[in-house]
Amino acid sequence: MRLCSFLLAADLVLAGLPAFAAAEPATAPLPAATADSLTEIQAGQTAGQLVVPLNKSRLLHLDRSYREISVGSKDVADAVPLSRNLIYVLGRKYGTTNLTIRGDGGTVLAVVDVVVTYDVSDLRQRLQELVPDEHVAVTPAGDSIVLSGQVSSGDHLHQIMTIADHFAPGKITNMLSVGGSQQVLLEMRFAEVERSALKDLGINTNLAYNDNRGSSVSSIMGTAAAAGGTFGAISGIFNSGQYNLSATLNALEKKGVVRTLAEPNLVALSGDTASFLAGGEFPIPVVQSINGAAPTVTIQYKDFGVGLGFTPTITGTDYINLVMNSEVSSLDNTAAISANGFTVPGLKVRRAKTTVELRDGQSFAIAGLLKNDFSNGISQYPWLGNIPILGTLFRSSNYQNDQTDLVVIITAHLVQPTLAKNLATPLSNLVLPTPSEHFGQGKVEDEGNNPAGTGEDQNHGYMLP
């Protein structure tokens, strides 16, 4: 009895095979394993978009049965019917094509734009592993990848762009912005220092800077190379945590071997340039003639002196990459030009460019910028003694006798802007007395209770006095 039942069931299965093969594909249930790659569309949709990663597939599910499908460019994508309402789409080449779905009688049910682009899931995972603290949006756009969002530092931005460029060389569109504290305060101190004190500080004006990042004074002196630059030396980097340079200079100033000439401050945004000129301008007559009229003489002014340009870039939590351009120009009477009663002196110009990397609060020193031609020029141009900062140096007999030198100390700080209410002035606590207090008690001011400025023990993005 059991054998007869088995044979009867087998006959029914074999008899039904031809009929199943001739029938249309039945509506299949949605595969649970491919739910993430499944796209639902409705009949009558004429402008949809399906994004397919290169060499990967997506499933397209229609809300009703279809009769046939056609792809505009099979080089870009291919489509295979899986059931009456399920279509398998494969990305073959970067580009865009369309998929037309027709029903009974050739009626167009839907037209889908198929975009084959990068699979950015691997790039997202790699960025999450290497820079987990940053939130970067990775979006495919045709044959390119768009990175958007905000990162905390320029160093992380560089890392992200390097990773993305390895993933898709030349196809990355950078729309990332850098947030956080992106202002740098540069504290400069111009000082006239005796040459003997320069050696005590570890500064040798006959030595050139030798790429010692974050080194101490002692290591700078042991590794400095012979001078090959246009002038003097960039002596080294002083770590304010291990070596209190400011306190040392103040102590030497009390002994009379150091004299501070000026202490200007500059604030620059990360990536922007801040410049400073310690010197003056001299007039240059320029003859102009317009439309055959009588020539006229106008005056233009040319800068000279010590010019410093700084371009800081924040490369980490507290690291500052500082590009420094220095230019020293002095009047040269031997290259003067005389015409129509005017004598215009020439210029001797020396330029240098260097890059240092500092941590927040570290300093570096520049020495040997000025040579004897400056001191010799004082006798030819006495008014050089009146120019800002350098004039005081030029009037010094010790400098003229080559016993002192100009040293510029630059200290870099990361700063943030603050509110005006947090800043205090000498008049913040001033309270005017009442007439009775003024005439009866002789008070010229009353005690105030203004908490402005309290708790602000950090550097901020404004010019300090």
Image: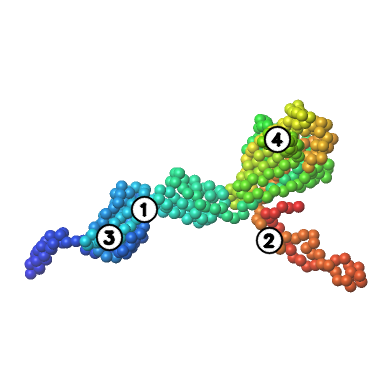
Residue position for label 1: 115
Residue carrying label 2: 419
Relative to residue 370, is residue 412 depicted above or below? Answer: below
Numbered disc in front, either 1 or 4: 4
Image position of 422 with respect to 127: above or below: below
Q: Which dot marks residue 293? A: 4
| Residue type, label 4 | Ala
Sequence-first tag of 2 and 4: 4
User: Going from the N terminus, do you reach mark 3 or mark 1 first?
Assistant: 3
Question: Where is residue 90 shown, x and y percent of the image?
Answer: 31, 52
Q: Amino acid at mark 1?
A: Val
Q: Helix, strand, or loop for circle 2?
A: loop
Q: Foreground residue, 34 or 351?
A: 351
Mark 2 and 4 residues: CB-CB less than 8 Å, in contact? no
Pointer 2 with pointer 3, Cβ within 8 A: no
Q: Residue at x 67, y 42 (%)?
A: 309
Q: Earlier in the sequence, mark 1 or mark 4?
A: 1
Q: Position of residue 198 (x, y in %)?
A: 76, 37
In three-dimensional space, the C-alpha distance between marks 3 and 1, rounded to whole angstroms, equals: 20 Å
